[in-house]
Amino acid sequence: MDRYERAFFWFSAAMLGLFLCVLAYVTVGMHIRLPGPSGRIIPAPGQNLGAAVLATAPFNHPGLRMIGPGEYEVVMIAQQWFFFPRRIHVPAGSRVTFRVTSADVTHGFFIPGTRVNMMIIPGYISVETYRFERAGDYRIICHEYCGLDHQTMSAEVVVK
Amino acid sequence: MRTPVVDRPDAPFALPNLQRRIISLTVYLGFSALGVGVINGLAQALNYAGIDIFRYYPGLRTYYEGLTVHGVFNVIILTFAFANGFVSLTTARGLNRPLNTGLLVAAFVSLLIGSLLAAGAILSGHASVLYTFYAPLQAHWTFYLGLAFIVVSTWITSLNIFLAVAAWRREHPGQRIPLLAFISACTYIFWDIASLGVAVEVVGFLLPWSLGILPATDPMLDRTLFWFTGHPIVYFWLLPVYISWYAMIPRQVGGSLFSDTAVRIVFLMFLVIIPIGLHHQFVDPGISPKLKFAIAFLTFIVFLPSLLTAFSVMYALEIGSRRNGGTGVIAWFFHLPWSDPSVAAQLLAMLGFMLGGITGLMNASYTINLEIHNTTFVPGHFHLTVGTAVALSYMGIAYWMVPYFEQKDLWNRKFALAQSWIYFIGVLIFARGLISGGLAGMPRRTAISLIDYPKPPGWFEAGIMTGVGGSMMFIGAAMFFFEIFMTTFFSRRTEIPDIPFTDTIEPPAAAGFAVNLDRFRYWIVAAIVLCVIIYGPVIGRHIPPNFISPGNANY
Ligand code: HEM
Ligand SMILES: [Cu+2]
Ligand SMILES: [Cu+2]
């Protein structure tokens, strides 16, 4: 390879290296994490997935719970073509942890304008925490194709 | 002293007419698929503008049936057909020897059967599972069988290419493989390894499951196997176009490629770094963030060969422009033969690819993925890459290849030029719409014209741009088909004995390290080792599979 090619190669490599350092900083320094392993739903032999979900804590009690001052947990079930519960209310400034799983097919869980964005895959529990600073109606959208009425699958977080 | 990228450049091209005909049918099968695909594309673009025209499409039941057609026809049938045909042609020219006719026919027939099976399943409403077919949404078994046939057609093509290269090597012991044949073979070696994931998924799990032999499937395992292939597949779409950009375009603009070695290294980098598909699963549960970061790292490394391509191809273009009197630091770019439709289409495709590359890097950027995963940002990005860099280059290539196939003049050069520009300007508007919509949280794969909640701010404007740009793309694509139709049936006969190929200024080294670049087996071993290191533990965690999902066909 020629001198200019080499120079361009190292320049490109250095640029990509720099981008990676920034990403590492965002992750480690600013604590913006991607979803990781956070639990599974394991049906008993012969049991179907929907029944297994309802038999696994905390999905036997879906809904909103206060777990500390300004801290909430929502346990949600996604299924064709709605989320349960469909609407939750929290005060502005709350830190909300979403704990979501699917009773049937793969769904998405996305709140535009926030960094809450995860896949809901049968057999797996997805968890994300977000602090809602500003009041308003936030929409939870299923953003993975999940069948006929996928486009109507949404829920709401009402922040007051 | 310049070195041609093919064997015996001055001897007549040794491809028999029958083989040329089969190759042309393969490519035409791909373009027919594109024709059907873009008709649905128009309806999707208008959907985002809030207009539902799908209901007027005869035979289509839902938005998602149409979207499945669009995905499967455009990025599975079109791309595989084009690669099978075009790369067979470049291999034959690179080695200047015929291929095996039986294998060419077998690949074509396999592709045809596969496409018909898949198309039948989709259009009868039994496979609205999109081109990613995530389980447990379940298609009719003919859909999966069709996909299997389509993949097998690429393997038959590989066999044909490898046999030709092996025969050439036996006849030319100790010689470097001609560059055009090297990059062609490299593309298919790469794809054979990369396709194993989806092959195991379809044949091992989905097909038996759809036939009722397996009562349930493991969605997470299927998904992971899918993306093992699903990322590298984009390079399988791209590499045939790189073959044109590296080995043909320099000649078409009157230039030369600079370095032989650099090109071989670029293709080998794609071959070795296969296992990065996990970056499509950044927001999946059940995969550790540390592994995800390692994958982000590898993904950034595979960005390197594309940056090198930008450099080498630019350099080749500049050489061409300056030989023909181009001057200046930037001005030479406008002095390129923009009036040649084949060149213009591919130059525009390259410009599109720059934007596509940048948005792709954003996608791969780990935490940024949280903002845009599964929003319309993603189709905004990939209509610049596969939808433009690849598809518009196919059209540009067709502007010399169809005349070569048919031994006819291109029907109307001005019309062909207008075609490329309209498509290109269309895609800029279209992608701008989808990208800004994605940043405003607009989800992809969604019949937006049918949602039952109020549109959040930003979606309306984004949708309008998508609709306007998408309609222009549709017009551009329709003009392409008209041009090809007129060329085939109503154009003047002429004699076109050969296809374009360039030469390199720095020849392939006859001794030293560079010779090892041609020893494919080292690179294949390296690729497999890397796959096992990354995917071994990931797949291992899913063994035995967790069969929890019966089929679901609520679509
Ligand atoms: C007339 C030209 C085209 C138009 C107007 C168009 C329009 C669209 C739109 C609006 C979407 C998003 C649909 C959604 O997410 O709901 C889409 C998806 C897609 N397009 Fe195109 N497109 C065109 C050409 C192409 C070409 C040439 C290719 C590739 C060769 C392509 C590949 C794809 C793929 C792979 C998807 C994703 C499908 C999925 O999400 O399952 N498109 N197209
Ligand atoms: Cu859903
Ligand atoms: Cu959905």
Image: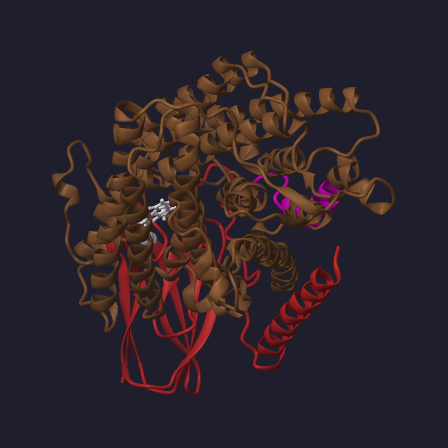
Q: Residue furthest right?
A: B512
Q: Residue furthest left?
A: B56
Left or right of residue A87, residue B314 in this image = right
Question: Which chain does the brown colour mark?
Answer: B
Placement of B489 over or under A123, stated as above or below:
above
Q: Within the magenta stretch, is there residue B535?
A: yes
Q: Position of residue B244 (x, y in %)?
A: 53, 41
Placement of B17 over or under B370, stated as above or below:
above
Q: Position of residue B144 (x, y in %)?
A: 43, 28
Residue A51 shows in the view: no
Q: Which residues are magenta?
A: B527-545
Number of callouts:
0
Q: Quadrant of residue A65?
A: bottom left
Q: Quadrant of residue B232?
A: top right
* Near-viewer residue (B151 or B168): B168
* Near-viewer residue (B16 or B540): B16
Placement of A34 over or under A135, stated as above or below:
above
Question: Which chain does the red colour mark?
Answer: A
* Near-viewer residue (B71 or B201): B71
Left or right of residue B310, residue B387 in this image = left
Residue B192 shows in the view: yes
